[in-house]
Image (cartoon, grey):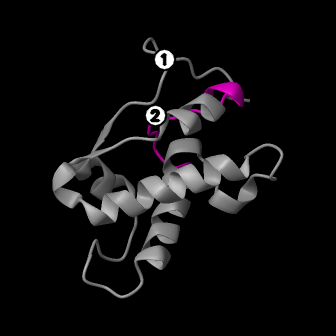
Amino acid sequence: MGHHHHHPQGGCYPVTLEELKNNLRIPECDTSKDEPLLQALYAADEYCRVFTGRDFDDYPPNKFPHLLRYAILISAGSFFKSPLDRVFTLPTQAQHFLKMYQIPCSPHPPKNE
């Protein structure tokens, strides 16, 4: 079942802020809010849903290492901290795990079932 998602450049694409807004169902990208960590969690969950087709917590820790979880959280957090950056990329360490566990890292349409 969909284990062969190989991309020519071998890594994750950078994602523009606009693509993120279109793909991630997050309440508001409001950096003035008091709950940046909560927003980061929402973003991480949606990031996983869009980029892997599974929810953040669907992965058992041995298949979805804590280090990768933190990397995604950090990425999600920085997305909220610097929206003018306009680009969202996973840290190299996270890309390594994505490759190792063959988790696709390009956006795909959500499954409607």
Q: In terms of image quadrants, where is residue 49?
A: bottom right
Query: From which residue to which does the magenta span run?
Result: 99-113
**Image vertical order of residue 36 relative to residue 33, above or below:** above
Q: Is residue 107 magenta?
A: yes
Secondary structure under the numbered disc 2 in the rendered image: loop
Horizontally, is 85 left or right of 40 in the view? left
Horizontally, is 87 left or right of 74 in the view? left
Horizontally, is 88 left or right of 107 in the view? left
Q: Horizontal and vertical percent for residue 101? A: 71, 31
Residue under pointer 1: 7
Predominant secondary structure in magenta?
loop
Residue lying farthest to the bottom in this orientation:
34
The residue positioned 73% from the left and 46% from the top of the image is 64
Foreground: 109 or 98?
98
Kindly indicate whether the residue at mark 1 contacts the one at mark 2 (C-beta within 8 angstroms): yes
**Image vertical order of residue 27 relative to residue 107, above or below:** below
